[in-house]
Amino acid sequence: MLEDITRYSGERFLRVGAHSHVKGLGLEGLKAKFAGDGLVGQVEAREAAGIIVKMIKEGKMAGRAVLFAGPPGTGKTAIACAIARELGRDVPFVTMSGSEIYSSELKKTEILTQAMRKAIGVRLRERRRVYEGEVFQLDVKTRRHPYNPYQEVPDHVVIGLVTKDDRRVLRAGATIASYILSQGITVGDVITIDAETGRVTRVGRSEEAAERYDIAVVDERPVPRPGGPVEKEKEFIYVLTLHDLDQLSAQSRSGGLLSLFFGAPPTREIDNEVRREVDEMVKRRVEEGTAEIIPGVLFIDEVHLLDIEAFSFLNAAMESELAPIIILATNRGMTKIRGTDMISPHGIPLDLLDRMLIISTRPYTRDEIRKILEIRAAEEKARLKAEALEKLTDIGEQTTLRYAVQLLTPSQIIARENGNEEITPGDVEIAVKLFSDVRRSVQELEKWKDKYMY
C-alpha cells in the first residue's frame, strides 16, 4: 500500500467572471444573431461594434474613439469585451474606471499613459543559436571555493546531447554547470542551452528515458526527443506590452551601487525620455521585420468621472502614432464636466465628443433577460426549473437584470441545502427575502432612517 500518495483533484480553479461567457460579438457578416457568442439582444449596438472591428482591422480608427452610452446594466462592458475577443487572442484588453486616475502617488496623466501603453502589445521575434537534445552523458567537475577550502564549486561540465538525427559531446564552463546543478538535470532529460547567455532550460524527461507513473503530474509527463542537429538556430516569440518594455528600460537605467548590490525597485513614474527610446527601438525592429505591433483596447468605464485635464490629455493622446483603440462607457445624461461648471452630454467636453463614434444601448426586453439568465446559469453550472427561470425573469423585469443574475448563485446554494438538484421558485423566493434589491434597500433606509448615523 502506498502511504505517500495525497489526494489531488485534476480540476483547475476557474473563476467565473461577470463577462467570462462572452466569446465575441455573435455576428454573421455584419448582422447580429439574437443570441451568439454569449451576447443577447442589443442588435444595433453589436452591429455597430462589428463595423468598429472592421475599421480597426483595416487601420482606419486613428484619431477616433468609441463611446458606449446607455442605462446601467445594458451590456456596455460586455460589448467592449466582445470587441477585444473579435480582434484576436494576443490583443491586450485593459479595463479601468474613470475614478482610478485619482492617486496620491502618480499624476493623472501618468496613470492614463501607463494604461494606454499596457493596451499596446509588441510581438518580438528573436532567432537564437541553441544546443538542444536529450542528455546521454553528464560529468560536472568541481574545484575548491577560492575563499572557503571546505566548499566546492562547479568548475566545468562535460555534457553529451543526442537528437533523432545528431549526437554531440560538449564541454562548457562554470556558468552552465551551475545552471545544470541548480535545476537537478540528469541523464535522460531534454534540455535547451542558449549559446549566447549560457542559460539552461529543462524541457522535460525524454520519452525514451522516462519512468512510467500511474499518476503523473504535468512536470513528470515525458516529452519527445528533439529532431535535427544538436546545434541550431531557433526562433523565440515573446508578446510584451509597451508598458512592460518601458519598465524594463527604466529599471536598466536606474543603475548605481544600490541597484547593483540590492536590485532596483520597480519604478512608478517613467521618464518620457525612456518612453521615446522604447518607441524608437520598437519602430526600428518593426522596420527590420523582427517585431509586430498589436494595437489593443483601452476600456474606460464611468468615463464621466474623468476631469477636464484628463479629457484634454485623451484628446491629444488619440492622435499619437502608438495609440490603442480607446473605448469609453457612461450611464450619465446631461451632467457637469468634472472640474468645471459646464453642462455637457455624458459629462464629456463637446470637442472630444465630436471625435467619437457613439453607440447607444437600451434596456433589455423580457425575452432577452430570460436568455441572458439561461447563459449565466450555464456558465455558473446552475440548473434551473422552468418555473424558477420565469421567476428570475420577472425579477429582472421588475428590478434590474444585474440583480436577477446576482440571485443565481445564492439560489443554487439554497437549493443544495434543501436537497434539490435544480433551483425551484421556492429557492429563489428565499434568496429574494435574504438579499434586497436597490428599491427595497431604499425603502428600508426610509423606514429606519432615524436609526442611521448622519
Image (cartoon, grey):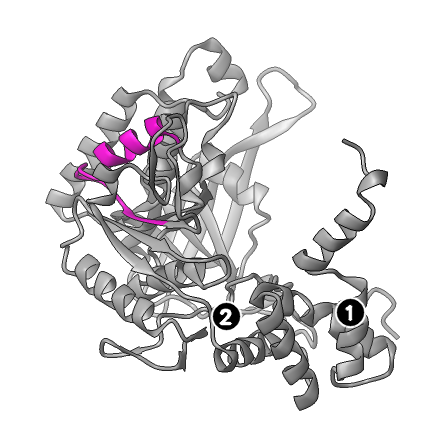
What residue is at 66 percent from the left and 90 percent from the top? 386
Q: Residues within 10 Å of mark 2 (few under 14, many from 20)?
A: some
Side (left or right) of 71 relative to 32? right
In the picture, residue 317 is in which quadrant?
top left
Q: Residue furthest top?
A: 257
Q: Nearer the viewer, mark 1 or mark 2?
A: 1
Side (left or right) of 379 relative to 281? right
Side (left or right) of 156 relative to 394? left
Whole-percent x and y of residue 99? 49, 36
- Earlier-in-chain disc, 1 versus 2: 2
What residue is at 65 percent from the left and 65 percent from the top? 406
Total numbered badges shown on the rendered structure: 2
Is 30 in the magenta? no
Residue that carries the numbered disc 2 in the rendered image = 21
| The magenta segment | 307-328
Q: Determine the secondary structure under disc 1.
A: helix
Q: Nearer the viewer, residue 340 or 68?
A: 340
Whole-percent x and y of residue 191? 45, 55
In the picture, residue 389 is in which quadrant?
bottom right
Q: Amino acid at mark 1?
A: Ala
As drawn, 362 above or below 296: below
Report the quarter where the C terminus lies.
top right
As drawn, 124 above or below 421: above
Q: Amino acid at mark 2?
A: His
Report the quarter where the N terminus lies.
bottom right
- Residue 381 visible at all: no
- Point out which mark residue 431 bears: 1
What residue is at 22 percent from the left and 26 percent from the top? 276
Is 315 in the magenta? yes
Q: CA distance from mark 1 to mark 2?
A: 24 Å
- Residue 231 visible at all: yes
